[in-house]
Image: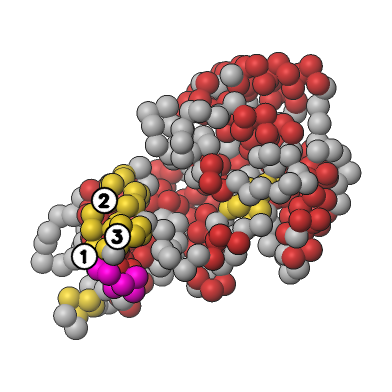
Amino acid sequence: MGANMHDSKPKGLHLRGTIWWIEKTIRIGEQRRELRESTGCRTLADARTVLERRDADIRRELSAGIIQVYPGHERTFEEAAAEYVVDLEQRGKDPTRALQDIRMIVGVIGRLPLSHVHQRTLQPWIDAQRGQRSSGTVERAIRTTSTVLHFAAEVLRDGNQPWLTLAPPKLRTPDWGARQPRPITWDEQDRLMESLPAHLISPVLFALATGARQAEITTLRWDQQRDDQDLPEWSIWWIPPEIRKGNSRKTPSQQNGRYLVANRAARIAIERQRGKSDEWVFPSPKGGALYRVNNHGWRTATSAAGLDIRFHDLRHTFGERAADAGIPLDIRRSLLGHEHRDITLHYSSPGLARLLDEAEKITRPAAKLIAIRDMAG
């Protein structure tokens, strides 16, 4: 199980006769570009070099399309942010969170020269977020801003000159009090399902049944399923390292993927998705990846259902239901994808079977389950 993850041939290279060709879809956030061309190389090593160079060029172009660049005498925050996103991609790290943070703040400081980005220029934006966004969300945006500034000072160069010649300033983050988790009840779940747009019902049900994070759901592909003859179809899915939260702060050698276990309720949600996309389990109605569930449709639905919740609260809901079902703490941690020392204990075939058995304990009345299954269709 999972042996194909260690194939030495990079994804996107295919041999046609004696020449290696590139067939790859490159994405940054909602931007995508189809790359279909010959490398002109006969050896895999040379083809890999061409692929890496073309990949980097296109990602830089896509980043420039997301974050407009305004030329000037001194490099701007927008330019440094675009380079930072490309660097994340080149190092195999998911740039989605960084892009979300940059979009929040780029309208305020994007055109500023890097030396003009500091606490005084950021403070009006920080003050305006109170009551609009949580302090945690604002704190994350400020951390990303600080990271871009350090990247400009320590990595980016025009010749021998750093993009930011001053020491990166220390940025203070707000503390408006952490928001408490808000698990939902089964009845509240029913109200939410009645309010959701059709394309969000299955991913939300899947989140409630697995505790998966938003990025794990929106990027889930059919080829991530892992077959095990002793377990039901669609029970085991592989989440690659670049999707897992926290891996962006680790070197590639330190990053680990994980197995996601889908109980019966989750498999019902998956089954309703068959035939909607050849690639994505939960595609966007417009085609391609869903990108995110926590969108306008989600916010409208939660408001209509009278629920003051975030998408992450579905993960808390799964954790609470797992505890109520008597699932042991170490099993709950594995089901939620928390890191622990001995991953082999649960990632062997018998271990995965044990995880699935425990996940099946999270149940609700059959009549309700059938009603929601029909609604998802």
Lower position in the chain sequence, tag 1 or tag 3: 3
Per the model, the C-alpha gap separating discs 1 and 3 is 12 Å
- Residue under label 2: 36
Q: Amino acid at mark 3?
A: Gly
| Magenta stretch encompasses residue 61 | no
Which residues lie in the magenta part?
41-46
Crowd band around label 3 with a 10 angstrom C-alpha radius: few (<14), some (14–19), many (20+): few
Residue 374 in percent (x, y) is at 65, 16
Mark 2, Cα crowd under 10 Å, few <14 / some 14-19 / many 20+, is few
Residues at marks 3 and 2 touching, judged by CB atoms closer than 8 Å = no
Q: Of tags 1 and 3, which is closer to the observer?
A: 3
Residue at which label 3 appears: 17
- The label shown at residue 40 is 1
Q: Secondary structure at mark 1?
A: strand
Q: Quadrant of the C terminus?
A: top right
Asked if residue 330 is positioned above or below residue 374 in the image, the reply reads below
Q: Secondary structure at mark 3?
A: loop
Residue 99 lies, with reference to residue 188, above or below; the image says below
Q: Residue at x 40, y 43 (%)?
A: 128
